[in-house]
Every structure is written in C-alpha cells, then in structure tokens.
Image (cartoon, helix red, strand yellow):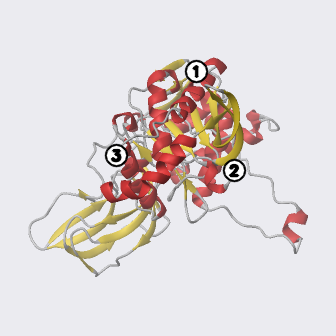
C-alpha cells in the first residue's frame, strides 16, 4: 500500500500560509478523489480542499486552527499501488513554490474593502491588499540601515520602510507568528504605540489598551470580538488611510435614459441572455470606457514609481451575509460587452455570497466600484482599496426636479438623478485628473443610448 502526501496548496500569488479551519475527514476515513478533506482560510479567501486521490486517511499532521506554510505536508493518504510523490489539491492551479531561504514562509495581508453596498462573501472585502511577489518572500529582511538574518515577510518589510523603522528596531520587536515571526498585526500594533514608546526599549510586544472599566462592567454594553475577516478589513482600511492622502470628488448625473432603457428591456434581456441585468454592469461599462480615456487612474504606486496597469480589472465591493465585505474582480472588463459584464457580475456576486470564490477571483484588481445606493445612500466617501489609487461610489438613483435644456428653452422636469463620488490617492491623482475622470464616467452614463438594442 502506497503512502501519498497531501500538501498545503498554493491559494494565490501572494499567499504563503493558510489556517486549517476544519477537518472534514479523520484518520481511518475512506476518501474519494475530489472529495473534500478539509477547509482552510487565508488572508484572502476560505476554501474547501479536495483529495487529489482515492484512499484512506492514515495520518493527519496538523490540528484545526494551526497555521501551515504552503507546500507543507498536512496529511498522509494510504492508497493501493506504488508510492507516489506529494500531491497538491486540484482545487488550485499548480504554481512553482517561492524560492525558500526560509521554508516556513510568513503571513501576508488580506483582501479587504470598505463597507459600501454592492455584493461580497469571504473577505477583499473581500477589498484586496496586494503583497509583493511570492518569489521574494523568502529573502532576509533588508532596510536602508542594515540587514538581518531574521525572516520578515515582504508586507512587514514594506510597512517598516514606510514607517521609517530601522532593521535594528525591527529585530527587537517580538512576534506572535509561527516560530516567533513578526506578523502584520504585530508591526501595526507597534506603529500605533510607537509615538509614546521609546523604540530603543522595545523588549516585549506592544499590546492594545485594555477596555475601560465602564466598557467591561456596564450592563447595557455588549463586547463583541472581531472575527478574522473583520480584523483584516479593519487593518486594510487603516493602512489605506495612512498610506494614501484621500481626496473625494462628486458629480451629479442624469441617468433617466439609462433607467428607462433598463425598465423597458430587463425582461427581454433576461429572456435572451438568461441573466437579470442590474445597474452594476452598466456602471462598470462606463468606468472601463473612462479608464481608456484616463489611463493614469488605472495605476498603483511603488515608492517613487508609478506602475501603469495595462489590464482593466474592476473590482466590485460585495456585502456578505455575515456583514463583512469581499471584492471579486472582473478581469479585462474593457474587453467585455454588456451581456458579458452582466454574466460576470451576477456570477461573481452570487458565488461571493455563498463563499465559493476562487482565490484568483479576488486578486489583481486595478480599480474598484462600490454601490452605496444599494442601502439607500445618496453618496459616500469610500476608502481606496490598496494598492489601487481610486474607488468610485455610486449613490441611489432618485427622481428629482431638474433643469432640462430643449430647443424651446429650459424646462423643469422630473428626472432620474444620482451622485457619483470618487476617492483618489492625491500622491499621484490630482484634482484635474480625478475630477475629469469622474465627469467622464458621468458623461458616458448620461449619454447612454435609450434605443440601444438588447
């Protein structure tokens, strides 16, 4: 009888470890090929991991809640036949493991987003924070002031560089991760307390202030511990506000023709394409066109360099039943027609709410849309989904009196109006660019052809 090693699969470009949430099988259980063996969670998505082969679970090497590096053997499956090399789960694409100066790896940040109102399931949000490429994960830490043999993830090193934390200072910071590694939470907690603590005396992990007595003992208060996803979202939002100087611009848009077209054609559209059309794919279509006109909104920042993205990958903030958010990404949205966008939006939103998104479906976004109008809000000031530089919020569409220009003069008429708001990173997007881009999105929505064929 052969012994097959089940290894922790690679769940995305920047993922180097995962947490075991639940074992669906126990030692001695029979398992079929593609049958779920366990559930795991990363900073970006939760996933069920199927067996790559039929056999019997002969050994389980890690417990629930253990954090396991990618590529580590997590279980042994006994099979009939000759011995077989270790196999990853078929749930994810086979990618080369990162070069390992340290085979244990380190954690990366999660994909999170702001609580806006479109659709979303396991957290990017489910808004997504990108970490450096996995191939760079296993290098020794470096800083302008020296080098260290201690292992630091690229995210921790980037935060240290941004906050001007020397390598000597970082080396004194105790970590709560596996084998004492410094995690994102450790360094952010240290940064938050750094102003009141002499860095030369750091000898123990800086802890958050304890709740006040009134908060603990007040019988009219309830203390709720944040779940893992909410903590990731919170960290991501704080990081975004700290890294990027936010500016928000607004425009009011007359979408009467668009609303009337959808109302007249939604039944025919569903009959022809098998998809219900919402306003979201129409908004995404306008955004993709405007990005083509203003490509410098579709960028990210790497220290003093601006990286212009050739792909137009638009994320849509999606609310989950848990109250958290995730941001599935529509890849190459500028190359899709309206039926294609509609199908992609419905598919991603539906699977997001069911927790069935694949890791790659919440990665590589270059711009984000959030629909605050879903909750009846007329406008919002969304937080940028790092490492992107802009996020657009679509407000509620409401009937309002408005001035309409005609060949007979100006008239007051009831129109379908909405606000669009754009938050952007003022390091690289100034008011002229941000305002012009936002106005162009509005122009495309106002110019929607009310006679457009389904």
Cα–Cα span, label 1 and label 2: 46 Å
* Rendered residue at 55%/34% (across/down): 446
Q: Residue beneath label 3, please?
A: 340
Q: Is residue 260 left or right of residue 452?
A: right
Quadrant hosting residue 304: top right
Q: Residue beneath label 1, please?
A: 144
The answer to which of 449 and 233 lies nearer the viewer is 449
Dot 3, how many residues are within 10 Å of its Cα: few (below 14), some (14-19), or many (20+)?
some
Pinpoint residue 266: horizontal percent, then vertical percent: 43, 55
| Helix, strand or loop status at disc 3 | helix
Q: Are marks 1 and 2 in contact (CB under 8 Å)?
A: no
Earlier sequence position, callout 1 versus callout 2: 1
Front tag of 1 and 2:
2
Q: Residue beneath label 2, please?
A: 377
Pinpoint residue 419: horizontal percent, then vertical percent: 66, 39
Q: In this view, does 146 lie above or below 268?
A: above
């Amino acid at each position: 009888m052969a012994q097959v090693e089940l290894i922790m699969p690679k769940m995305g470009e920047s993922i180097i470890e995962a947490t075991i949430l639940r074992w669906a099988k126990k030692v001695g259980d029979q398992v079929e090929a593609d049958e779920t063996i366990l559930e795991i969670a990363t900073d970006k998505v939760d996933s069920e991991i199927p067996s790559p082969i039929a056999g019997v679970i002969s050994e389980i090497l890690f417990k629930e809640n253990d954090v396991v590096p990618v590529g580590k053997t997590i279980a042994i499956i006994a099979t009939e036949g000759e011995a077989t090399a270790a196999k990853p789960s078929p749930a994810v694409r086979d990618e080369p493991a990162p070069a390992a100066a340290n085979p244990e790896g380190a954690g990366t940040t999660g994909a999170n987003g702001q609580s806006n109102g479109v659709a979303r399931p396991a957290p990017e949000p489910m808004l997504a924070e990108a970490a450096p490429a996995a191939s760079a994960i296993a290098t020794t830490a470096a800083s302008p002031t020296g080098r260290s043999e201690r292992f630091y993830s690229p995210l921790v090193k980037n935060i240290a560089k941004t906050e001007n934390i020397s390598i000597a200072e970082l080396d004194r910071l105790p970590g709560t991760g596996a084998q004492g590694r410094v995690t994102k939470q450790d360094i952010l907690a240290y940064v938050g307390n750094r102003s009141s603590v002499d860095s030369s005396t750091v000898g123990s992990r800086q802890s958050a202030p304890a709740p006040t007595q009134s908060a603990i003992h007040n019988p009219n208060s309830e203390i709720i511990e944040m779940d893992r996803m909410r903590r990731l979202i919170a960290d991501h939002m704080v990081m975004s506000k700290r890294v990027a100087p936010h500016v928000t611009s607004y425009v009011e848009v007359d979408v009467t023709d668009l609303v009337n077209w959808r109302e007249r054609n939604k039944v025919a559209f569903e009959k022809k394409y098998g998809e219900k059309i919402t306003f979201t794919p129409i908004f995404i279509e306008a955004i993709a066109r405007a990005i083509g006109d203003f490509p410098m909104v579709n960028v990210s920042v790497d220290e003093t360099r601006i990286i212009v993205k050739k792909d137009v990958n638009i994320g849509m903030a999606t609310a989950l039943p848990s109250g958290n958010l995730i941001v599935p990404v529509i890849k190459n949205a500028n190359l899709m027609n309206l039926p294609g966008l509609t199908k992609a939006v419905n598919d991603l939103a539906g699977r997001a709410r069911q927790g069935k998104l694949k890791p790659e479906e919440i990665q590589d976004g270059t711009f984000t849309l959030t629909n605050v109008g879903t909750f009846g809000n007329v406008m919002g000031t969304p937080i940028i989904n790092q490492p992107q530089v802009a996020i657009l919020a679509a407000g509620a569409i409401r009937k309002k009196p408005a001035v309409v220009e005609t060949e007979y003069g100006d008239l007051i008429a009831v129109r379908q109006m909405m606000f669009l708001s754009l938050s952007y990173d003022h390091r690289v997007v100034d008011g002229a660019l941000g305002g012009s881009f936002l106005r162009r999105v509005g122009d495309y929505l106002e110019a929607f052809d009310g006679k457009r064929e389904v």
